[in-house]
Each structure stands twice: as structure tokens, then as C-alpha cells.
Amino acid sequence: MKLFNKIATAFCAAALGMMMLTSCEGGDLFSINAPDWLSSKADSIAAEKAKNQGGDVIEGMEEDVYTVGATDLGQKWITQFNLNINPAATNTYKNFALIITNDEDRGAANYKEYGAIRYDYQPSGNSEWGDYIDRSLATSDLEFGSDTDSGVDRLGGKVTLTIDRTSGGLEVTITNGNVTKVYKQTSPLTNLNADASNTTIRAFLVPEGSFINFLGSTIEPIGGFTSREDKQPLSMTLNGVPKKVLQGTSFEDAFANVTATIQFEQEVSATVKASDLTFQTVPNMHSLGKKTLVAVYAKTYKGEAANTPIIGTAEFEVVDKMYTSIGATDNSTAFWGAHSDNIKVAPGETFVTNFTNYTSGQNNWNNFCVVLCKADNTEYAVVRADNYGWGDGYGACSTSGGQSDWGAWLKAMDGAKVTTYVTNNGNGTADVKAVMLGTDGNTYVQEYNGINTVDPNDFYFRFTVDGSHIEFDNVIGADDNSTGFWGAHSEMINVPVGKTVSTRIKNFTNGVSNWNNFCVVLTRQERADNYGWGDCYGACTPSGGQADWGAWLKAMDEAMVTVSVTNNGGSIDVKCIMVGNDGNTYYQDYIGISPTDGNDVYFRFTVDGSHLIFE
């Protein structure tokens, strides 16, 4: 990857203006139909990059054009293609796999796979897999003992693939005249289709460390045939662009994981790596703020110089501070790939959490998930942001909040401000509520009530992600701790009568005085340093005053604080658990603040020479 510096200022300004007008991501704006002046600039960029381009096979390129259907019982499919093995490949699995499925589109609710048969053959490895594939039925005249054996290059060349169901079973033959692999199953395939009368299967090929040029097929692929001629690029969509980049991060590090999905002629698409793209940012990355990443791709499908390069764009932000994040900020973290800590919720308690949700935008489920579990991580239930969940306790719950326009909701969730409420009802059930303020200004609500099988004395929750990430970036007060007393306030949080509501913050202090920390504001105020005031304060009993206030004050900078407010009906209890930066846990309670109106109890936070981040 290299950062080019030869785009004229006029191009950058004009391109940025056009992108701001469209607010799009992808190559439609800068396709081959773009104005001549822009196309000529792209040509010059491509020519510059071409000086350093070699002829290596593109690692990982996939051509999933030949998804083949209509292979009904009693039919045979034969196809031929050139399998191009990366000459630098050192692993035996760098070839391709045949995936056999039922008659459903990938991504459909009823989509199921029989399994996979890869061209290489390794009896002790994973060259065949799937619940309906019997590995003992595979044979080959080229056997590998391990993934690192030599000889994978022998699998390249003109390959003939045959799927034969004429005898009632399944016979797959893969040969290039040099190496032949056969899978022969005489028993009929189990029918995985929902309709028992439909015996159709589908098949598609997935290359790894190779690419395929198709030569012909006896069955027309879903979507129609494509020619074996080279294909010009038409448009691109950038993937994996981080939402935020820390100021000072190098260009190479920031965008190393970016890929692009290229749409070629004849409805062929492929995903390419960052090394096959040329990048520029508009404006540059040196200053803070919103930026546009501009990428240029200048190759045909077969890797030749394109007639007209294409351009894709995506937005990101350069920031001077990265807040606590769950999941990679480019939304590349897969399902279950990152988790927060478990948070305990006591019987009768509701725990409130605030964060910003970011999504890849690919699917409704590419957002946050709430996992309800025991201390040992045994799950009660998992609920998603999009009106779906699972687990032993999920079946009994009632859901509300399914959106009328999921497309609009998904788009609004990228940068949505989210508040979640996790309630332990104390009777073996739990509730989860998510209030999501979307980037479109609309508020979306999702509720899961009555999740059961819960042990009220062993109840925790945590967050996980799937093609998304969340950031705890709700900040009260200036991050240099310059905000004076009463200078910034959080939103109000309601505490119903007979309930306890808790939340967690990270506290930062200027360290000058004990009171330069968080304050909890009720009908009157209570502060973090065992002191408070107001008409109701005199009746309370404070506890937790520290033996060494100097050590406590020092430990309160970046302390993790859990604040719990209990509405007893005519009185209020406030409990603070503070885990200091010294690893010690400090406690502060205010019990019996009274008299209060139990039907109208709220609390919020304010600061004094400090600032807070909600976590």
C-alpha cells in the first residue's frame, strides 16, 4: 500500500463536495460514467500505481459466480475451469472447495449445507467436512500428510468437475488429468429441503489462495452464464473502514484491514485486499474531524490494467481519544468475538448502561447483543438489538419493538446512542429493554420481558458484538477536568418505587480536593466524598468514610464506580462501589435519605473539577 500525493487540490475539493451531497459509500458516484476530468485523474493515479504492480496471483480472490442449481436427482453437472494456484502457496488447502447445499439461497432462514469437498486430500486433515459428508468415501491419487506438504501446485490447471446423481447417490469427481479425487456415496442424500418433494441441491465453489476462470458448464448457473473473456470493473464498495482513527496513527496501520468488493461486468464480483487499492484521504489525516477515504482500483477481473479505474469512498473520523470499545472499530469482529465484563444484577435491581453502537450495516444482527448468564457464564438467554434471541429462558419471554422498516433502522443504528436496562425481577424472571436514539433522530425501543429460568441470586449480564462494535463514550464534563461545580449534568434516570436502579461510570478527577469527583443528584444532592446537603440529607446515615483520604483521592482518577439508587417509597438509599486505580475497592453509602415522594424519584450525575464516562 502507498499513499499517493499526486491528486490536484481541485480534485480533492470537488470530490469531497460531491460526496457530501450524496452521502454514499461505494463506487456509483465515481463509476466509469464519471466526468472526463475525474476519469482522467483516476487514470493518472492508476498509471502511477501500475509502475509497482507485478503479475502475482491475487491471494484470496473468489469468483462465486457459478452457484449452480437444478441438479435434480437423475441429473449430472459437468463444468470445466482453470484453477490458478498462487505460486507462493505453501499450504495444501490453498485450492478450492465444493460446497453442497439444499435448494435455498445462502442467508435464507432454511438454508442448510450437506458439507464440503476440497480438491486436496488429507485423511487426517479437514479436506472434507459436514454432517452429511462421509470422509471415508473420498479417495485421491495425491495424498497429503499435513497442511505443509509440498505439491499443492499439482492441483492447478484445467480442472473438470462432475457431480453425478444418476445412480441415486452422489458421486463427485475432480480431475485435472494429473490428480483425480473422487467422492462416491451410493446411498441417497438426506433431503434437507423443507418441501419433501423437492430433491434439488445446489453447489458452489469457494477458492482459497487461488482463483478460478470458468470455461464451460452443462447447467446454467443461477444468475446466468458469464463469458470467459476478461471483465472490466464497474463499481466498488469499501469494507472494514474503521469508524474512528486515533490521531497520529499511520496511514498503513489505520487501513491495513480494508478490503473492497469490486463489481465487474456480467454481474461478476470479487473482494480484493488493501494492497490492490490506492488510497487518499480528504482532507488529510493530520487534523481532527470527519474525513473521507478515497480508494482507486485499476485492474480487470484477470488482473490486467483496466480501461477506466473506479473509485470508492467511505467516511471515518480522526479523534484524539479512543474510549473503551468492545469489538474492533472497523466492525470486523465476528459473532462472539469480543465481550465486556460480566455485571451482577441483584434481585429487584435494574442496571442501566449507555453506549454508542456501530454496525457494518450488512444485516440486522450486526449490532450489540446482551448475554444474560450466571457467574460461571452459563447462559439464561441471549437477546439482540433486532427483536430476536435464544436460550433456555428466551422462549417464555414476550418481545416488543419489531420495527416497521428494518432497513431504515439498520442504517440509523450506525452511531446510535443506546441505553439498555437489564432488570432482575427477583422471581426467577428478567427483563431487557434497549432505547436506541438513531442517527436519523428517531428513537427505537426493543423489549424482552419475562425471560425465565433465572436464578435471582446468580444473575449477570454482559455485551457482545457481531460485525459491529460499541463504545462507552457518553462523557459528562470536559476531559481536562476543567468543568466547575454544576457545570455539566447527565440525563435523568427514573427509579420506580420499590426498585433499585444502578449504573456504572469511570470517574476522572483533577485531584485537587476530595469533592473534585462525581456527584449524584436526587431531589437533593449527594457527593462522592461522604458529604451532602439538602432538606432530606440530614435524616440519612452516611458510611464508608475512608481511613486515608489522600490515598482515596489519588485512586479516584480513572476509578470504576457503580452507583445504586433504591427508592424505598418514602426514603432513598444511595450506594457507591468504587474500584480505584490502585486495585482497591472503596464503599460509600447514604442510607435513609428522607422524606421523599416515592412516585417521583430520579437521579442524575454532575461534576466538579472532574469528568465522567458512562460504561
Image (cartoon, rainbow, N blue to C red):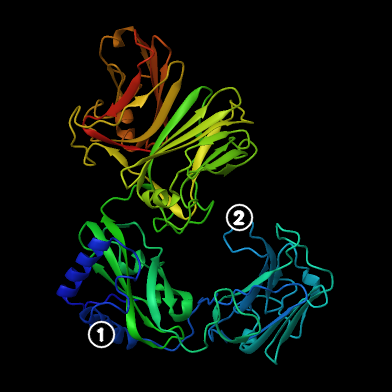
Q: Position of residue 463 (x, y in %)?
A: 48, 43
Q: Return the disc, 1 or 2, that comes first in the chain's sequence.
A: 1
**Front in this rendered view, residue 542 or 341:** 341
**Front in this rendered view, residue 122 or 278:** 278
Which residue position is annotated with label 1?
A: 44
Q: Disc 1 to disc 2, how far (Cα)?
A: 46 Å
Compared to residue 524, the image places residue 138 above or below, namely: below
Q: Is there any visible trace of residue 555 in the rendered image?
A: yes
Find numbered disc 2 in the image and state the secondary structure of the residue it sits on: loop
Quadrant of residue 239 in the image?
bottom left
- Could you tell me which residue is drawn at 74 percent across and 78 percent down? 75
Residue 425 lies left or right of residue 553; in this view the side is: right
Quadrant of residue 204 in the image?
bottom right
Residue 534 lies left or right of residue 310; in this view the side is: left
Q: Is there any visible trace of residue 578 in the rendered image?
A: no
- Could you tell me which residue is drawn at 31 percent across and 43 percent down? 441
Compared to residue 166, the image places residue 511 above or below, namely: above
Q: Nearer the viewer, mark 1 or mark 2?
A: 2
Residue count near mark 2 (Cα–Cα under 10 Å), binned few <14, some 14–19, many ≥20: few
- Could you tell me which residue is drawn at 52 percent across and 76 percent down? 62
Q: The C terminus appears in which quarter of the rendering? A: top left
Spot the residue most to the bottom.
177
Q: Position of residue 348 (x, y in %)?
A: 51, 22
Q: The N terminus appears in which quarter of the rendering? A: bottom left
Residue 484 lies left or right of residue 595; in this view the side is: left
Which residue position is annotated with label 2?
A: 109
- Count of number-bearing discs: 2
Compared to residue 573, the image places residue 431 above or below, namely: below
Compared to residue 170, the image places residue 130 above or below, namely: above
**Front in this rendered view, residue 363 or 378:** 363
Q: Position of residue 475 (x, y in %)?
A: 29, 39
